[in-house]
Image (tube, grey):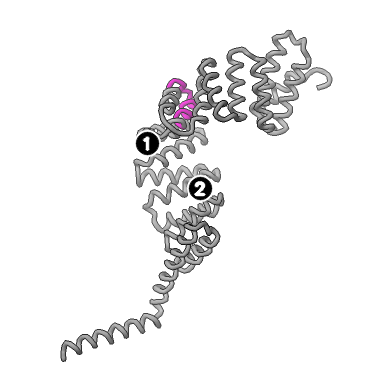
Amino acid sequence: MGSEYRVKSGYWVCLFLTIFCLSGVGCQGIRQRARAREDYDRAVRAQKIGQTDQAITALQMATKANPKLTPAHEMLGDIYRDKGDFERASQEYETCTTLEPKSALHLYDLGLMNQLMGRLQKAADSYLKAIKLKPANADANMNLGIVYLTLGDHEKSVEHLKLAATQAPTSLEVWMNLGVALDESGDLPAAEQAYRKAMELKGDMNGLLLNYSGNLIQQNRPDEAVILLQQAINEKDSPLAERRMGDALAAKDWLDAAVGRYEKAIRLDPKYTGAYNALGDTLITLYDRGLQLNEPLRNRAVAAWKTSLSIQPNQMSVVQRLAKWSHLEGN
């Protein structure tokens, strides 16, 4: 009898608590969190079958019901990132870093969005915090190195890219970016070694071939550069590949052939100021070598520089070259 009473008594206590919870203010939050979790699960299912808009709606409902539901904010950030809406993605990732300030992943995601939007100092700050929490973070070190390179801090750029290379020694992307940073810092032999290391790895070779060839041109080794550039062009022709081939041929003193490559780069990209400038410089070299007797060459050089300035006016070196060589009547 006593046992039966205790069971029944427990039942009524449980029932009382359930009734109290359904009517109490404190339990409203429990219901909202449960609804938020349901909305989040619905978003996950929608995203799995490609219903991105429905997923966004469900996630917005989830974060409204429970603003502290970090997975919903993170998923929203990922969706906005993939849609190219970096501003909204950064807002969601920033919320994640507030809710979970010791998450290196959230800080990395926030840094990446700021980097893509050109907010380089903010990106650097986020990457540094991510690295402090997780030092062996190759992606954060690599991206931080790229940010520092863009900011012009070559020393810090090389430092973080070297760290990334030790953390991800089989990453072609890391070694290629390290080569670029070393190129920019003026350490051409070390840059070549980084490019050579990248050549041993599998991945997208086209960008590597273009960067490595640029390094060889700077080291006055155009013959080797031509071989790499021809390989890159055979794989995938591009304005940069043709412009680099022009540079290599010009370094070999094959100026007429270089002119043809620059003109092809311009045909591929009519707004490529670097190709217009290189074309003008090469044409004016040919004009000067001919004792300035071939006026069409000078006119073509002037026209190339003028076109470049019409696309990008703030090029003082081009303005100076144009002023020097457009002094004859009719220009």
Q: Is residue 315 above or below residue 89?
A: above
Mark 1 = which residue? 168
> From where the camera sits, is residue 67 visible?
no
Magenta residues, dominant SS class = helix
**Boundaries of the magenta span:** 177-189
**Residue 4 inside the magenta-drawn segment:** no
Kindly identify the amino acid type of the residue bearing the numbered disc 1: Ala
**Left or right of 119 in this view: 329:** right
Quadrant of the frame with the C terminus: top right
Helix, strand or loop at label 1? It is loop
> From where the camera sits, is residue 116 visible?
yes
Kindly identify the amino acid type of the residue bearing the numbered disc 2: Met
Q: In the rendering, which numbered label is found on residue 208?
A: none
Q: Residue furthest right?
A: 330
Residue 295 vs residue 316, the one in the foreground: 295
Mark 2 = which residue? 113
Residue 28 sits in quarter? bottom left
